[in-house]
Amino acid sequence: MAKIGREPAGGVGAMRAWLRGARLERAAVMGLLLLVALASAASGDEDAGEVNNLFDQACDFYEAGDLVSARAGFEALLKTGVRNGAVYYNLGNCYYKQGEVGRAVANYRRALMLSPRDVDTEFNLDLVRSEVGFRDTTSAFGGGSIGEAPLRLASAREWQIVFYISYYLCALSVLAVLFLGGRARAAAARILIALVIVGACSLALSTHGRSRFKGGSDAVVVAGRTEFMSGPGAAFEELVRLSDGVELRLRARSGIWVEAQLPTGEVGWVREGDLEPI
């Protein structure tokens, strides 16, 4: 993300003094806010038409029953850098109908990262999990960290919107601090502090939400059957055989082997090549 400016150290008082410098500085701040607004509004618009056409084409293939072409179309969209819940949802449907349960689970979970309240994705994921044998992997692993809870309520993009709104309201609060007096100024200063906190938290959540696509702590078995071993090697005891679609929490790596935890809590080792990270 491009830098949007640097705030001076020292809190509200220092910020107020910084803005009082001259009319030119205030104009620069407002101009910078306008540039940020224009940049955020225009982001992605340049190629939006082409992306929509690719998506519509892939959907047409899917509705016509041409799952191979539909899957290729949705995957082509992802290669362009598109991150959209509907794309991952439809790609998951393609994999499921082609019998690749593990990759279906992986894509449904990615879809929920981007659209955490989508009931169709939740239904399909729960259905596939029931077929695999584990209905709710997230609950089995303890519900995830505290930092993950807000991302189950709103997507990374929604938290980014909250950040932008907070940022613009901060600008208005700064103007209020500059030009109001008495109790109104004190109230504006308190509101400014609250908005800075909200903005910082929402930016952190948005950044964390996007970073999950760089490889998280979970993975899905995508091989037909894979051995769950007591140690990192074929010479160790086989604990159980895992079917396609079983979700795991990754713990450590040793060569081509990964230590992982099942939703039941059992820990063992599987070949990394049999997994798809989420």
Image (cartoon, rainbow, N blue to C red):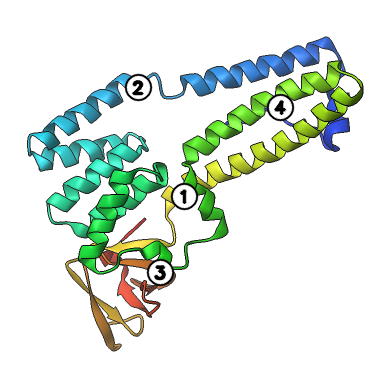
* Residue at the limit of the structure toward the left, as seen here: 65
Residue that badge 3 annotates:
140
Quadrant placement of the C terminus: bottom left
* Residue type at tag 1: Arg
Q: In the image, which disc is placed on residue 203?
A: none
Residue under label 1, please give it: 152
Amino acid type, residue under disc 4 in the picture:
Cys
Q: Position of residue 76 (x, y in %)?
A: 25, 36
Rendering quarter of residue 163: top right
Crowding around mark 3 (Cα neighbors within 10 Å: few <14, some 14 to 19, many 20+) is: some
The amino acid marked with disc number 2 is Asp
Where does label 4 land, which residue?
A: 170
Quadrant housing the N terminus: top right
| Disc on the earlier residue, 4 or 2 | 2
The residue at 73%/31% (across/down) is 6
Residue 47 numbered tag:
2
Q: What's the distance in space between the residues labelled 4 and 3, CA to CA?
A: 41 Å
Circle 2 or circle 1, nearest the eye: 1
- Check the image and report above or below for 101 versus 9: below
